[in-house]
Image (cartoon, rainbow, N blue to C red):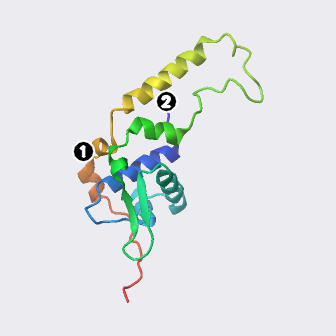
Amino acid sequence: MRLTKFTDLALRSLMRLAVSKDGEALTTREVAEVMDVPYTHVAKAISRLQHLGVVEARRGRGGGLSLTGAGRQASVGRLVRELEGDGEVVACEGDTPCPLRGACHLRRALRDAQEAFYATLDPLTVTDLVASPTGPVLIGLVGRPVERPAPE
């Protein structure tokens, strides 16, 4: 099973937010800088994570991104299911439907393998993902400097 880049980025963004200090609210741009990925990609992932209720975004002075309590305890398996969608490992329908689709053992075996993959991730939480040694490494990541307006 291979995750999409979108899901990978969303999970890594959650992990970085999970190690933020109390009261520290990173901006989407800061997360993008630390992860060394385009801002637009992170913005799309953050938007989806907000929709799932695991990230909160506040606008204005003192605003930024923070992980919700539900986000800290969210099952990684559930998050991956939500981010990846309902797609199957193989596409049996489409422009050229597979002639075996009605009598194929492969589709069922791959569906079972996909569910086993998710089941392995189900007991893990976002908090589990940032346990040592990962958390300290995430805290130490520094991206390109972000220009912030000077306080007035």
Residue at 41 percent across and 72 percent down: it is 146
Mark 2 touches mark 1? (CB < 8 Å)? no
Within the image, what quadrant is residue 103 found in? top right
User: Mark 1 packing: few (<14 Cα in 10 Å), some, or many (20+)?
Assistant: few
Closest to the observer: 14 or 147? 14
User: Mark 2 packing: few (<14 Cα in 10 Å), some, or many (20+)?
Assistant: few
Q: Is residue 50 left or right of residue 142?
A: right
Within the image, what quadrant is residue 122 found in? top left
Closest to the observer: 128 or 145? 128
Query: Which residue carries the number 2 mark?
Result: 1
Query: Which residue carries the number 1 mark?
Result: 131
**Residue 82 in picture, x, y percent from top left:** 50, 40
- Rendered position, 82 above or below 100: below
Within the image, what quadrant is residue 149 found in? bottom left
Element on which disc 2 rests:
loop
**Residue 11 in picture, x, y percent from top left:** 42, 46
Question: Mark 2 belongs to which amino acid?
Answer: Met
Residue at 42 percent across and 59 percent down: it is 56
The number of numbered badges drawn on the structure is 2
N-term-proximal mark, 2 vs 1: 2
Which quadrant is the C terminus positioned in? bottom left
